[in-house]
């Protein structure tokens, strides 16, 4: 009887080992699937964030273009006094200092204190700065026209967004190193 009992106990242990191995295999499979779905979710979320930032930048370009054009429309007799080309459009002071942060750009010919682009009567604030990039830079030169420059905060930063922005804006945008240069007026 003792031998029979030992044989039955041995069979139960083998069965238990067999079932345990399948349970462990199932747990490993579920874990692998969880990791795969987690990775897919993260990649989808990153793609969504990149697309949201791209849409935001395209909107910002439109808003800033509108503000620059509005400046010249409100004060058509204004002159920036730097050069003879496009005098009614804002130009950063001093011809050799032709770039300025967008929040310091003023409309030429505005009465009294010069109005910067944020103070126009259109009720639209200047766009917010995205975390990956510096504030927009405004450039107005005699030879090159009026441009907006988007600079990443770190070298090589925002690469996916920059590449998509270049594709989206087509011929009005060009890469210059890590920067995106967008032509508003030639």
Image (cartoon, helix red, strand yellow):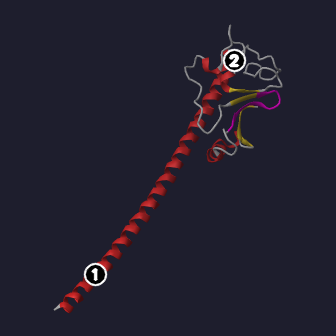
Q: Tell me what residue is drawn at x 59 percent, y 35 percent.
A: 130
Q: Nearer the viewer, mark 2 or mark 1?
A: 1
Q: Tell me what residue is drawn at x 22 percent, y 87 percent.
A: 8
The residues colored magenta run 140-151
- Which quarter of the figure is the N terminus placed in? bottom left
Check if residue 147 falls in the magenta segment.
Answer: yes
Mark 1 Cα shell of 10 Å, populated few (<14), some (14-19), many (≥20) = few
- Between 82 and 130, the residue placed more toward the observer is 130
The picture places residue 23, in percent across and down from the top left corner, at 33, 72
Q: In the structure shown, which secondary structural element does the residue marked by tag 1 occupy?
A: helix
Q: In the structure shown, which secondary structural element does the residue marked by tag 2 occupy?
A: loop
On residue 107, the disc is 2
On residue 13, the disc is 1
The picture places residue 36, in percent across and down from the top left corner, at 46, 61
Residue 28 found in image quarter: bottom left
Give the total number of marks visible in the rendering: 2
- Which sits earlier in the primary sequence, circle 2 or circle 1? 1
């Amino acid at each position: 009887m003792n031998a029979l009992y030992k044989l039955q106990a041995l069979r139960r242990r083998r069965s238990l080992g067999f079932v345990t191995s399948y349970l462990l295999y199932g747990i490993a499979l579920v874990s692998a699937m969880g990791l795969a779905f987690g990775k897919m979710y993260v990649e989808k979320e990153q793609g969504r964030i990149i697309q949201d930032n791209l849409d935001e930048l395209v909107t910002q370009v439109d808003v800033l273009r509108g503000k620059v054009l509005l400046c010249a429309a409100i004060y058509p007799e204004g002159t920036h006094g730097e050069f003879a080309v496009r005098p009614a459009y804002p130009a950063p002071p001093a011809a050799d200092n032709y770039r300025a942060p967008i929040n310091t750009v003023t409309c030429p010919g505005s009465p009294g204190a010069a109005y910067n682009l944020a103070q126009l009567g259109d009720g639209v604030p200047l766009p917010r700065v995205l975390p990956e990039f510096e504030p927009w830079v405004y450039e107005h030169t005699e030879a090159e026209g009026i441009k907006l420059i988007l600079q990443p905060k770190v070298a090589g930063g925002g690469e996916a967004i920059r590449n998509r922005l270049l594709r989206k804006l087509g011929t009005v945008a060009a890469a210059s190193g890590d920067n995106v240069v967008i032509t508003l007026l030639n």
